[in-house]
Image (spheres, helix red, strand yellow):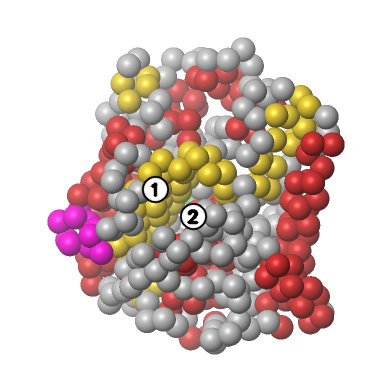
Amino acid sequence: DSSDVVDIENYVKANHAEPNKKYFGAAKGRNVIYISLESFQNFLINYKLDGQEVTPFLNKLTHDKNTFYFDNFFHQTGQGKTSDAEFMMENSLFPLPKGAVFTTKAANTYQAAPAILGQKGYTSAVFHGNYKTFWNRDEMYKSFGYDKFFDANYYDMSPENTINYGMEDKPFFKESMPYLEKLPQPFYTKFISLSNHFPFELNNDPNFPEGDFGDTIVNKYFQTAHYLDESIEQFFNDLKASGLYDNSIIVMYGDHYGLSENHNKAMAKVMGVDEITPYINAQLQRVPLFIHVPGVKGKIDHTYGGEVDVRPTLMHLLGINTKDYITFGTDLLSKEHHELVPFRNGDYVSKEYTQISGECYSNPSGEKVDNKLCQDNDKVAKTVLELSDKVVYDDLLRFYTPKGFTPVKRENYDYTKDQT
Ligand code: GP9
Ligand code: MN
């Protein structure tokens, strides 16, 4: 009931990480462009197949002068996959241990990023080349306060443009540009890519050799990842040509793994190890996080973090305080950031240790160590997951309104009328 939310508020406030003065407000008033990199695992960055870089554009971006690239960043998704990642990025809450929060808890009260920014003059929009009911997005986005949702109906879904779940990434980003350019600024937008999705198929001949690891799925993963890389380059070029690039924060993240444990045999060859141990498998849950901030000097940042940490990071860059929001992650750029990444199943990776099924391993050697060394973090990981689940299962945010925030009215949003 409503007294639970007081305990949660107290916990969250006691664990708040103060923004880093160096970055707080550094991107005040900028547009925001999120890009969900479908199934993109971090091992692809700087990976070479027969001497050829798989993702040359993203590799270059890791050294871009205005870009933060986080190389110890992990996905924390459960069964809700892409939608779980979206949920964390915009709410700093964990998705559910079973099922997808998007399908079961879409009518809850949330205080999501689009709503927060909407009340500060931003127009928000999602772009995705699949139909709006997939993952119940058209219901959840209302609760998040998304003004607009450009779904499959806004794209040329003819066979040469589509495969698997919908639009291929190049025509998707191309056709999104005119809609994006017409949005009132500042805007908060999200682009959900699709081509690098299992079973990793393209309409046209891939412009990249396939792998030779004795596993068709793994072999083709490199081809669709390369295509995604080219699509991002094309999109960046279009953003530059439109003038939006210099006025926008661009956040790109891998939503979740692409290659499951069913492909461990081939993955051992990919990684050049004898076998994918539980420890290595946990390390493979790294996904890239890029944050391009115009006018701010970036770096390759080795901070450990996860998807739940991105919202406070972004908000602080935009100069918005997060202390009054129920937030389970901490700002990756804060000196008080917690370098602990709980996975949805209760395992975790921290800077020093990795805990898998109750076993404790030392980073980066992967050597098994005394379980006692993992106990403190274990308690914290279990606590935040439990508190976050309480918020979601009991819809507790309906009893808590952050200072200066007006509760979202779902009936104000309609994605069936013309979104242009
Ligand atoms: C479908 C896309 C892919 O719209 O988000 O979904 P996934 O299977 O990765 O959750
Ligand atoms: Mn996905």
Q: Residue at x 44, y 34 (%)?
A: 200
Amino acid at pointer 2: Leu
Q: Residue at x 58, y 85 (%)?
A: 403
Q: Position of residue 275 (x, y in %)?
A: 64, 16
Q: Is residue 361 above or below residue 286?
A: above
Q: Earlier in the sequence, mark 1 or mark 2?
A: 1
Q: Position of residue 398 (x, y in %)?
A: 68, 81
Q: Nearer the viewer, residue 313 or 388?
A: 313
Q: Tell whether label 2 touches label 1 (CB within 8 Å).
A: yes
Q: Which residue extends farthest top?
A: 274
Q: Residue at x 22, y 67 (%)?
A: 181
Assign the C terminus to one quadrant of the image: bottom left
Q: Which residue is mark 1?
A: 68
Q: Which residue is mark 2?
A: 333
Does 354 lie within the magenta span?
A: no
Q: In which quarter of the view is residue 304 placed?
A: top right
Q: Is residue 38 visible?
A: no
Disc number at residue 293?
none
Q: Nearer the viewer, residue 60 or 35?
A: 60
Q: Is residue 153 above or below residue 184?
A: above
What's drawn in magenta, residue-wise?
238-247
Q: Main secondary structure of the magenta part?
A: helix
Q: Is residue 68 visible?
A: yes
Q: Nearer the viewer, mark 1 or mark 2?
A: 2
Left or right: 103 in relation to 128: right
Left or right: 155 in relation to 307: left
Amino acid at pointer 1: Phe
Q: Position of residue 244 (x, y in %)?
A: 22, 62
CA distance separating discs 1 and 2: 10 Å
Assign the N terminus to one quadrant of the image: bottom right
